[in-house]
Amino acid sequence: MYKMEGLEIGADDYLTKPFRVEELKVRIKNLLVNRKILRDRYMKEALMQPKELLVTSPDERFLFNLIEVIENNIDQTEFKVELLSRELNMSHSVIYKKLKALTGQSLVEFIRDIRLKRAAQLLSQNKLSVTDICYQVGFTDRKYFSQVFKKKFGKTPSEFAGEKEGE
């Protein structure tokens, strides 16, 4: 009963007593390897499409839910960690620790990263101005938006949009 309940609410694994130390070591090793694979995969996907993320593990389900909440509030300039915590029914510290373990990013960095990835998607469509996109993804300062965009993608939003237009 407790085992199923724990697994359903997102536990990575469940070990009953008595257990063998060798089994515990193998389970820990597998969990660490799977987390590293997931972190590496996330970090390599520069323009990850959140809707295309396949949900197969509790960690991926967590990331999917996290991205979905961010996407639903992406245009909210006042979108804060407190709202995210409420939406996920998790404490800020639990979200932070889990996200840091999975992606190597803090919650603020992750939210900004999702905003920038969405901005890149919108810029590549060449349908809106850079200023409109800046506000649409939740930035209030166009200069700051341009700075962080250039830091992430190596070009300004205008250069990025112009490059995509020529393709």
Image (cartoon, rainbow, N blue to C red):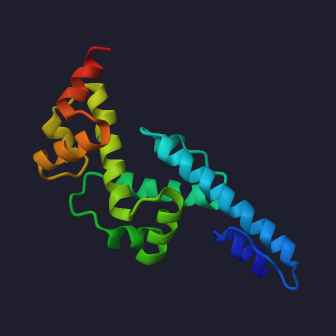
Place residue 61 in its image quadrant: bottom right
- The residue lying toward the viewer, choosing from 159 and 60, is 159
Rendered location of residue 139, percent (x, y): 19, 51
Identify the image quadrant of the N terminus: bottom right
Place residue 108 in its image quadrant: bottom left
| Residue ID at (35%, 42%) | 117
| Residue ID at (53%, 40%) | 52
Using the rendered image of the protein, determine whether residue 129 is visible from the camera's viewpoint. yes
The vertical placement of 65 against 126, above or below, is below
Side of 11 where 165 appears, left or right: left
- The residue lying toward the viewer, choosing from 136 and 164, is 164
Which residue sits furthest bottom?
Answer: 18
- The residue lying toward the viewer, choosing from 100 and 69, is 100
| Residue ID at (27%, 35%) | 154
The vertical placement of 48 against 77, above or below, is above
Rendered location of residue 132, percent (x, y): 16, 39
The vertical placement of 79 against 112, above or below, is below
| Residue ID at (88%, 85%) | 18
Rendered location of residue 86, percent (x, y): 40, 73
Side of 165 where 132 appears, left or right: left
Which residue sits furthest top?
Answer: 166
